[in-house]
Image (spheres, helix red, strand yellow):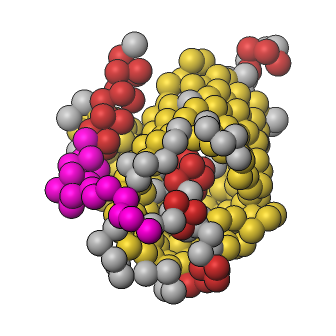
Amino acid sequence: MKRLKTHIDKSLICLFVLVGVIISGGIRPALGGEDPEDLFNYSFAVWLGSGFYKISDADKRLAVLRVPASYTLRPMQREASTPMDRLGFRLLLPAVIAYEEQTDTEFSFGALAFVPGLEIEIPVNKYWSLKPFGQIGAGKDTAGGTFQYIYGGGVKSLVSVPWRKFVFGIGNSWVVAEDQDASSHDTTGFSLFNAGLDIRHPVNFTIFDRRLDIGGYFVVNYFKNHVDIFGADGNTSKLKTLYEVGLTFGVSEAVSIWKVDLDRVGIDYRWGDEGLRGIGFNLGFPF
């Protein structure tokens, strides 16, 4: 229960911070003539992560906070005697708050989504683990749209190999997701494959009496089908490939700040098709 309370505290703090930003900026209702199809698809942010984005020809700015809350039901045990005892189980409790502002008009709106699920951690060998998962939830925007049912699943793969003072990570994942309008039952979906490399190394520095390490990673996200992230507005709506490079800092033991346990934080830069650019923040290598 203590671990669950920690994750809930972490989620609430992050949610309250972004809600405050949105309220202070003033969410305005949809203006007459605004086409709902031009709004960004916040549903997919559940899997794409947090950040501040701009697309060059769309006259839009987008802020997304994805709170990757979770609760470990049972940790993975690589050395357990039976295959079933080796499995780990984790509740996924991600929440998304998003905010879009159109720079050429006075139109802006917010959105909220919650898509819980279950992840199973399977140790393949000493270095390699697989993590199949499934999620289902819903979301709503402030621009007069109906509820969106959001669901998806996939599998993650992580190979972690120590060498001298370095730790190398090789990650892959496959995600298939879809959302459905609760009123019209129209659906949109995507399938995503990504691959990444992570390198970490300790440094001669401590924080809160804990040894610090620094890491860097590079991830390529490839959408099998073009994805409408920023709405059906012609040339600016289609995304095929998204790249991400990140810098992270970690400690040997989690640091408790305001009852929130953190062991790794970082920032990243993302770029992709149609002039998409963004600065994100993360809690480490996304696998």
The N terminus lies in quadrant: top left
Q: Is residue 132 left or right of residue 209?
A: right
Above or below residue 262? Residue 5 is above
Q: Residue 258 at x, y = what percent?
A: 20, 35
Quadrant housing residue 13 = top left
Quadrant housing residue 119 = top right
> Over which residues does the magenta segment extend?
16-33
Q: Say which residue appears at 49% left-offset and 36% top-offset.
A: 114
Q: Is residue 215 left or right of residue 220?
A: left
Residue positioned most to the front: 32
> Would you say residue 20 sits in the magenta stretch?
yes
Q: Residue 48 at x, y = what percent?
A: 57, 56
> Would you say residue 257 sits in the magenta stretch?
no
201, 147: nearer the viewer: 147
Residue positioned most to the left: 24
Let me know if residue 6 appears in the view. Answer: yes
How many marks can you see? 0
Above or below residue 158? Residue 108 is below
Q: Residue 173 at x, y = what percent?
A: 74, 51
Q: Say which residue appears at 54% left-offset and 78% top-offset.
A: 276
Q: Residue 36 at x, y = what percent?
A: 52, 60
Above or below residue 128? Residue 40 is below
Let me know if residue 127 appears in the view. Answer: no
153, 55: nearer the viewer: 55
Q: Say which residue appears at 59% left-offset and 75% top-offset.
A: 233
99, 143: nearer the viewer: 143
Above or below residue 174? Residue 123 is above
Q: Say which residue appears at 56% left-offset and 84% top-offset.
A: 275
